[in-house]
C-alpha cells in the first residue's frame, strides 16, 4: 500500500499539476523567460493551455452548483460504501492477526508416564528451535486446579484415580506462529513417543479467517460494481455536457482542433467530478467513523478486545481521491469516445 | 492553391452531387462559386475542408492531396483554410475576442500572440472597439465580420465563404466583398459560394458555375470525356 502510494505521489509531483497555484504559475513563467527556445515556449503554451482548460472546466462545474453537488454526492456514496467495508475488513484482519500470535499448543501425555518421565519429555520438546517455552502441568496439579475451578470437588472424590494426564503447554516462537507453522509443529509433537494427543485451538480462528476471506471477495466485487457505476454516472453526466456544448465542439473541429483538443475539457470535467466525489466519500466515511466509534469501543471493551475501527488516514484519503479522479476521468473518456465522433462539422456546412 | 481533378462525389447510388469537376485556383485568386440550390456548391466546399471525401478524382489543396490524407491529419489541413458561413457559427457564450481567438487556441498559440493577432484581425474588419462584447449584441453585418475575423486570424492561405452576404443588405455586402478583395490582394486564395448574381456581375471576377453537379462555367478543360466546360 505504502509502496505504490509513494510511486503515485512521486508521479503526481512530476506531472504539472492542474490545480492552479499562483506561485507555481509564476515560477514556471519565470523559468520560461530565461530559456527562450521555441520548443520551450511551445511546451509552455501547451501547459498554459492545460491550466486554462482545467480552470475553465472547474468553473463550469461550479456554475451549476446544485447539479454538480448531486453528481458529487452520488459518486461519494458509491465510493464510500466499498471503502468503508474495506476499512472494516482491515480492522477485522488486524484483530485475527493479534489472536493468532497468542496461539498455544496443548499436548496431553500418555497416562502411564511418571512425573520424572514427563519432565524429561518436556525438556526434549523445549530443545526444538521453534518453541519459546514449555510449561509442564503435572496431573496432580491439574486435578487440583480443575477441582478449584469447576466446583465439582465432591463428585471428583468418587473417582478412585486421577483421570487427568500430565500436560505440556507449549508456546511457539514468533516465526512459527502462522497457521502453517503451527500445523507443522503440531505434526512434529504428535510424532514424539509418549504424547497422546495434541490440541490447538485454532479452529475458530481459521473459521474467522475463512469468513473474512469471503467477506473480502464480496467487498471487492461490490467495489468493482460500484466503481463501474461511478464510471457510468460520470459518463452520462459528461454526455449531457457534450450535448450542451455541441456548437462549441463543431466550431473547434471546423477551425482545426484536434480530437485531443476537443476531448480535453471533458476529461478535466470528469477528473473534477472525481475529485468532488472523492472528497464527499471521505467526508461520509469520517462522519460514519465518528458516529460508530463510541458504540464499537463499548462493544470491544465488553470483549476485552483491542478492536477499533481504523480510519483511512492521510494516505488512504489521498489514494481514495486519486482513484476517484481516475474513475471520473475514465467515465468522461468513455462518454467522449462514444459521442464526440457523432458531432461532425459536415452538418453545419450546408447552404 | 486549390485544384480539382476529375472529381466526382456520389452520396447514394442515385444521387451524384458532383460530376467530374475540373478547375484550379491560383494563389491570390478570388473566384465565385454559383449555381442553383442543390447544384453541389456545399459539397464542393466540404471536399476542400475534408468534411467529405471524393468518390473519384483528386482534390489538392496547397500541394497536399486530400484523398490519401489520414483522418488524424485533417485538423492540420483545416488550420490552413479559413471558413466564413452564412449563419456565421459564432458562440454566444463568450466574447467577440474569444470567438476570434479560437483558431489560435486550437493551434496552441501563446496568450501574447493570441492577443496581438486577434486585435489585428478585429482591427482589419473594423470591430476592435467591440472585442469585449458578446456577439449577440452585434448587428448581423457585424456578426458576419466577426466570422471573417475568425476565418483569417491565423492567416490561412485559403479562405472559403458560404453565402457570406446572404442576410445582409447590398451596402453591407459590398463592404464584406471589399474585405475579401483585400485578402486576395495579399495572396489569399478566396472562393465565395453565393446566389447573389448582381454582386458577382459587379465584381467582375472569375466565376465557377455548377449545374446539377457539373461545372458548366469557369472550369478547366476536362482531361477525358464527361461533362465539359465552355
Image: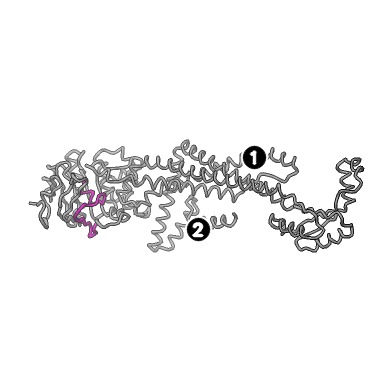
Residue B205, labelled with which disc? none
* Residue most extreme to the left: B230
CA separation in Å, label 1 and label 2: 36 Å
Residue A290, labelled with which disc? 1
Q: Which residue was labeled with disc 2?
A: A14
Hey, which quadrant is residue B69 in on the image?
Answer: bottom left
Residue in front for this viewpoint, A267 or A22? A267
- The structure's colour scheme is one colour
Mark 2 neighbour class, 10 Å CA radius: few under 14, some 14 to 19, many 20 or more: few
Q: Position of residue A267 (x, y in %)?
A: 43, 48
Residue at left offset 38%, top offset 46%: A338
- Residue B33 located within the stretch drawn in magenta: no
Q: Position of residue A23 (x, y in %)?
A: 50, 53
Label located before the other in sequence (1 or 2): 2
Asked whether the viewer can see residue B28, the reply is no
Relative side of A115 to A43, left or right: right
- Placement of A319 over or under A76, stated as above or below: below
The stretch of residues the image draws in magenta is B42-65
Marks 1, 2 in one chain: yes
**Mark 1 belongs to chain:** A
Q: Secondary structure at mark 2?
A: helix
Residue in front for this viewpoint, A199 or B50? A199
**Mark 2 belongs to chain:** A
Asked whether the viewer can see residue A181, the reply is yes
Amino acid at each position: 500500500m505504502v509502496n505504490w502510494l509513494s510511486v503515485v505521489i512521486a508521479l503526481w509531483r512530476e506531472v504539472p499539476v492542474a490545480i492552479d497555484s499562483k506561485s507555481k504559475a509564476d515560477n514556471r513563467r519565470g523559468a520560461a523567460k530565461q530559456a527562450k527556445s521555441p520548443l520551450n515556449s511551445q511546451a509552455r503554451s501547451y501547459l498554459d493551455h492545460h491550466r486554462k482548460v482545467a480552470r475553465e472546466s472547474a468553473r463550469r462545474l461550479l456554475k451549476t452548483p446544485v447539479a454538480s453537488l448531486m453528481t458529487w454526492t452520488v459518486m461519494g456514496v458509491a465510493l464510500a460504501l466499498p471503502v468503508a467495508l474495506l476499512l472494516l475488513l482491515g480492522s477485522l484482519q488486524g484483530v485475527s492477526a493479534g489472536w493468532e500470535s497468542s496461539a498455544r499448543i496443548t499436548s496431553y501425555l500418555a497416562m502411564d508416564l511418571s512425573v520424572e518421565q514427563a519432565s524429561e519429555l518436556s525438556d526434549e520438546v523445549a530443545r526444538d528451535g521453534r518453541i519459546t517455552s514449555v510449561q509442564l502441568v503435572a496431573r496432580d496439579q491439574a486435578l487440583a486446579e480443575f477441582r478449584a475451578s469447576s466446583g465439582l470437588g465432591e463428585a471428583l472424590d468418587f473417582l478412585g484415580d486421577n483421570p487427568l494426564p500430565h500436560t505440556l503447554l507449549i508456546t511457539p516462537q514468533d516465526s512459527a506462529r502462522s497457521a502453517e507453522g503451527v500445523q507443522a509443529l503440531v505434526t512434529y509433537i504428535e510424532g514424539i513417543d509418549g504424547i497422546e494427543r495434541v490440541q490447538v485451538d485454532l479452529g475458530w480462528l481459521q473459521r474467522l479467517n475463512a469468513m473474512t476471506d469471503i467477506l473480502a471477495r464480496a467487498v471487492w466485487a461490490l467495489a468493482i460494481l460500484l466503481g463501474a457505476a461511478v464510471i457510468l454516472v460520470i459518463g452520462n453526466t459528461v454526455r449531457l455536457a457534450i450535448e450542451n456544448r455541441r456548437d462549441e465542439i463543431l466550431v473547434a473541429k471546423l477551425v482545426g482542433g484536434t480530437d485531443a483538443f476537443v476531448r480535453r475539457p471533458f476529461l478535466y470535467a470528469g477528473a473534477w467530478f472525481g475529485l468532488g466525489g472523492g472528497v464527499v466519500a471521505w467526508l461520509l466515511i469520517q462522519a460514519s467513523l465518528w458516529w460508530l466509534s463510541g458504540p464499537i469501543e463499548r462493544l470491544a471493551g465488553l470483549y476485552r478486545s483491542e478492536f477499533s475501527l481504523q480510519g483511512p488516514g492521510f494516505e488512504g484519503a489521498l489514494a481514495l481521491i486519486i482513484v476517484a479522479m481516475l474513475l471520473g476521468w475514465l467515465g468522461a473518456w468513455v462518454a467522449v469516445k462514444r459521442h464526440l465522433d457523432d458531432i461532425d462539422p459536415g452538418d453545419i456546412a450546408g447552404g | 492553391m486549390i485544384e480539382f481533378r476529375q472529381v466526382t462525389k456520389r452520396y447514394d447510388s442515385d444521387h451524384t452531387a458532383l460530376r467530374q469537376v475540373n478547375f484550379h485556383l491560383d494563389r491570390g485568386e478570388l473566384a465565385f462559386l454559383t449555381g442553383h440550390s442543390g447544384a453541389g456548391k456545399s459539397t464542393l466546399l466540404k471536399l476542400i475542408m475534408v468534411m467529405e471525401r471524393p468518390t473519384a478524382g483528386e482534390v489538392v489543396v496547397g500541394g497536399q492531396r486530400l484523398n490519401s490524407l489520414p483522418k488524424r491529419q485533417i485538423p492540420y489541413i483545416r488550420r490552413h483554410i479559413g471558413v466564413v458561413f452564412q449563419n456565421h457559427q459564432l458562440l454566444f457564450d463568450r466574447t467577440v475576442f474569444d470567438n476570434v481567438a479560437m483558431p489560435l487556441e486550437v493551434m496552441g498559440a501563446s496568450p501574447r500572440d493570441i492577443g496581438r493577432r486577434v486585435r489585428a484581425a478585429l482591427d482589419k474588419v473594423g470591430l476592435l472597439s467591440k472585442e469585449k462584447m458578446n456577439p449577440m449584441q452585434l448587428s448581423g453585418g457585424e456578426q458576419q465580420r466577426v466570422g471573417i475575423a475568425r476565418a483569417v486570424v491565423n492567416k490561412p492561405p485559403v479562405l472559403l465563404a458560404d453565402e457570406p452576404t446572404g442576410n445582409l443588405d447590398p451596402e453591407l455586402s459590398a463592404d464584406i466583398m471589399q474585405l475579401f478583395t483585400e485578402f486576395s490582394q495579399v495572396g489569399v486564395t478566396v472562393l465565395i459560394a453565393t446566389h447573389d448574381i448582381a454582386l458577382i456581375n459587379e465584381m467582375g471576377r472569375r466565376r465557377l458555375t455548377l449545374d446539377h453537379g457539373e461545372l458548366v462555367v469557369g472550369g478547366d478543360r476536362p482531361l477525358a470525356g464527361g461533362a465539359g466546360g465552355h
